[in-house]
Amino acid sequence: MSINNLFTYEIIAQETPYINRNCSKCKTNTEFYCSEKFRVNANQKIVDIWLIYNCKHCEGTWNYPILSRVNINKIDSMLIQKFMNNDKETIWYYAFQISKLRKQCNGVNTDIRYELRKEKLDSLSNKVTIKLCYKYDFGLRIDKLIAEIFGISRSKVNKLSQNGTILLNPKINMKSKVIDDLQITVMGDWYDGSS
C-alpha cells in the first residue's frame, strides 16, 4: 500500500543580496549592502524614489533607481506611504529584483544566508512529497536544496532523479532554480543507500 506524506518547507531569506559596483570613495569595485532605506525626492507633483545601498568598506552610498520622474497621482497612495516609512517588505521586494539590479551593477551576489523552516520527516514512507514555499527568489538550485533536505550529496540527488526516484512538479531540470510551490516527490527505498 502506497502512503504519500505531504510536507511543506518554507525557504526564508535571512538577508538581501549584496551587489558589486565601483565605489566613488574607495575607487575600486566593491560590495554594497542594502541599507533598508528608501530615498524619496518630490518636486511639486513629480517623484523620484531610490533604494539606498552602502559600501561595506567606507559606507559610501549608491542609489538604486526605483521610480524616476513619475507624477505622484500615478502612484498608489499606500505604496507612497510604504516608501516614506521604509516598509521592510517593500524594500525586500525591490532588493530581490535580481535581473533589474544586474543591469545597474557589475554583479549581484545571490549566495545569501537562508533558513529552511520545515516539518520534520519523522517516518520515511515509500512516497514523500515536499511542497516548497519561496517568497524571495535568489537563485537557489533545486539539486542543492534537495541535498540539504535529505542530507545526501548532489551527485546522489542527480542519480535519484535520473532513475525516477525523485520527481518534480512542474517537470523542470534538477539544476534549475527553485520556484514557489514546486513539489518534490521521492519514491521507493531511496534513503537507506540502496538506490
Image: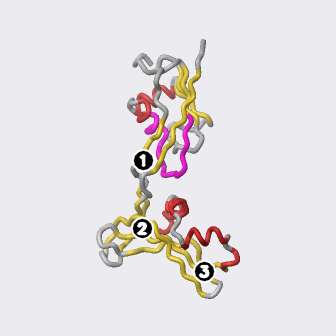
Q: Is residue 122 left or right of residue 80?
A: left
Q: Earlier in the sequence, mark 2 or mark 1?
A: 2
The secondary structure type at the circle numbered 3 is strand
Q: Earlier in the sequence, mark 3 or mark 2?
A: 2
The secondary structure type at the circle numbered 2 is strand
User: Which residue lies under the disc numbered 1?
Assistant: 114
Q: Where residue 28 sits: x, y (%)?
A: 31, 72
Compute the Cα span from label 3 to label 2.
21 Å
Q: Where residue 146 sits: x, y (%)?
A: 46, 34
Q: What type is the residue that disc 3 sits on?
A: Val
Pointer 2 local density, CA inside 10 Å: few below 14, some 14–19, many at least 20: some
User: Which residue lies under the disc numbered 2?
Assistant: 35
- The quadrant of the rendering that contains the N terminus is top right
* Quarter of image, res 164: top right
* Quarter of image, res 66: bottom right
Magenta stretch?
A: 131-146
